Image (cartoon, helix red, strand yellow):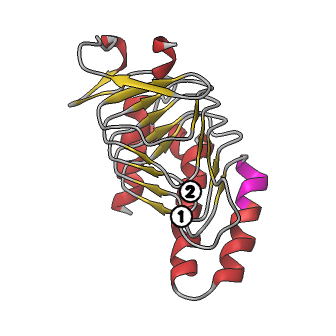
């Protein structure tokens, strides 16, 4: 139950439309997908792979968010708007990560083993971005809206474009409107 409270507080700190904890609990489809993923991931890791996959597909139908139960996701993960998000089986997501709608954490091959991205702690991924392959997005980096990332991104970087080009985040001024507590969330769309 403490994770649900933490998730609701986290969602409220990143979404100005979240007016109350109760409203967020009831209507935030990104949170519903994350909570269901946690249950499905537990099933997956306890050798109930088929029920985990079936449950994940039901949640995909209800929320528009597809999270493979084999993915590994940290704390305070938030999906804003949710629709069209796809997270592949071998994706790894750190703590305090935020995804906007239409993000794909996908593979580029049919090989068995690691084939999806790893996102470090504090990463923000803009709407429509595609991060493909077993690459690493370093901590506290931001991926711009509609970027296509196919190479590793160093920590504390902004990556934009097709194909994505990374540059240091140092020296960039974050919009104070998006500051939340001790963490400043930079909307990567402002760097396009």
Q: Which residue is mark 2?
A: 116
Q: Position of residue 178 (x, y in %)?
A: 37, 19
**Front one among 80 and 127:** 127
Q: Quadrant of residue 141?
A: top left
What secondary structure is the magenta-colored segment mainly? helix
Q: Position of residue 25 (x, y in %)?
A: 52, 46
Residue sitting at 70 percent across and 70 percent down? 55
Q: Quadrant of residue 153?
A: top left
Q: Quadrant of residue 167?
A: top left
Q: Read off the magenta span.
A: 59-63
Magenta highlight on residue 62: yes
**Front one among 175 and 119:** 119
Secondary-structure class at tag 2 = loop
Residue sitting at 75 percent across and 72 percent down? 54
Q: Which residue is mark 1?
A: 71
**Which residue ends up furthest to the left in the rendered image?**
182
- Residue 16 — which label? none
Q: Earlier in the sequence, mark 2 or mark 1?
A: 1
**Front one among 115 and 84:** 115
- Give the label, 2 or 1, closer to the camera: 2
């Amino acid at each position: 139950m403490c994770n649900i409270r933490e998730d609701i507080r986290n969602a409220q700190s990143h979404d100005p439309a979240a007016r109350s904890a109760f409203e967020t609990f009831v209507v935030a489809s990104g949170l519903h997908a994350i909570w269901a993923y946690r249950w499905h991931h537990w099933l997956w890791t306890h050798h109930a792979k088929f029920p985990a996959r079936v449950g994940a597909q039901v949640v995909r139908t209800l929320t528009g968010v597809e999270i493979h139960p084999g993915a590994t996701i940290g704390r305070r993960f938030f999906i804003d708007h949710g629709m069209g998000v796809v997270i592949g089986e071998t994706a790894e997501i750190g703590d305090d990560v935020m995804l906007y709608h239409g993000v794909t954490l996908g593979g580029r091959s049919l090989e068995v083993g690691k084939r999806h991205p790893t996102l470090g702690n504090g990463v923000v991924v803009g709407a429509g971005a595609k991060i493909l392959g077993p690459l690493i997005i370093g901590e506290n980096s931001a991926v711009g809206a509609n970027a296509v990332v196919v190479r590793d991104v160093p920590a504390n970087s902004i990556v934009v474009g097709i194909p994505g080009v990374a540059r240091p985040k140092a020296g960039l001024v974050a919009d104070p409107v998006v500051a939340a507590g001790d963490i400043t969330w930079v909307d990567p769309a402002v760097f396009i």
